[in-house]
Image: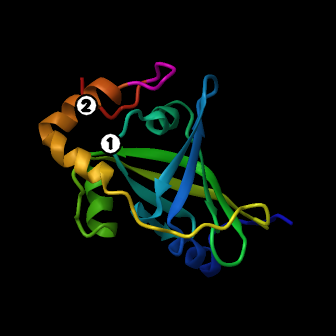
Amino acid sequence: MAKFYPTLTEDHRGFISRQRIFFAASAAATGRVNLSPREAGALRVLGEASVCWLDQTGSGSETAAHLRADGRLTLMFCAFEGAPLILRLYGRGQSLPRGGAEYAEVLAEHYGGEEPLGARQIVRLAVELVQTSCGYGVPMFDFAADRPNLQRWARAKGEDGLEAYRREKNAVSLDGLPTGLVKA
C-alpha cells in the first residue's frame, strides 16, 4: 500500500544511503520521457526536502533540457536486497551547470570540493512529495561492483576532449531542447 509524506524522514534517508542505484525520470510538456539509471554514490540528501546528485558527462543530457523546459523530476529508489521497498521523490529539479557559482557552492559543501573528471552538472531536486510502496514485485540482486568504464573513458578523453564531446553530444536533447550545459 502506498504511503505519502511531505518530506523525507530519517527512515527514508537511511534507505537512500543503502542504495547502489536510483532512477531519474523527466519530461518536457511534449516529446520523449527520459528515464536514466544513476549511481547512488553521487547523490546527497541536502535536507528534509532537497537532494542532489553530481552528474557525469554522458551520451546525452535529457534531464538538463527537461528541467529547463518544464522542471518536473522524479527519483525512484528500489530495494534490490533486504526488505522490499520502493521510494519515490517527486518535485521540481534544477540543473547547476559545471563552472557556475551554485555548482561550486554545492560541490564544496556536499562533495568536499572533489570534482570527478567528467562532471558536467549537479542536479538538485526540491522535493514536493515522498511516496513509499511495497516493492514486492522488485527482484532481488546481489551487488558485484561499480563499473570503472565512465572514469576510464573520461581520463582517456581528458578535459579538452570532454568539452568537445559535451559541445557535440550535450548541447540539445533528443527533441532539440537546449540543455544549458554548453556555452555557445
Q: Residue furthest top?
A: 176
Magenta run includes residue 148:
no
Q: CA distance from mark 1 to mark 2?
A: 9 Å
Q: Which residue is mark 1?
A: 57
What amino acid type should be assigned to the residue bearing mark 1?
Answer: Thr
Q: Which residue is mark 2?
A: 165
What amino acid type should be assigned to the residue bearing mark 2?
Answer: Tyr
- Element type at mark 2: helix
**Residue 107 image position (x, y, % from top left):** 29, 61
Task: Identify the residue at image location x=26%, y=53%.
Answer: 151
Mark 2 surroundings: few (<14), some (14-19) or many (≥20) residues within 10 A: some
Quarter of image, res 132: bottom right
Quarter of image, res 7: bottom right
Task: Identify the residue at image location x=56%, y=75%.
Answer: 13
Q: Which residues are magenta?
A: 172-177
Drawn side of residue 130 relative to residue 105, left or right = right
In the image, which disc is placed on residue 73?
Answer: none
Mark 1 surroundings: few (<14), some (14-19) or many (≥20) residues within 10 A: some
**Residue 83 image position (x, y, % from top left):** 71, 77
**Residue 118 against residue 173 in the figure, above or below:** below
Q: Which quadrant would the C terminus be assigned to in this image? A: top left
Task: Identify the residue at image location x=40%, y=31%.
Answer: 179
Looking at the image, which is closer to me, 4 or 42? Answer: 42
Drawn side of residue 72 relative to residue 1, left or right = left
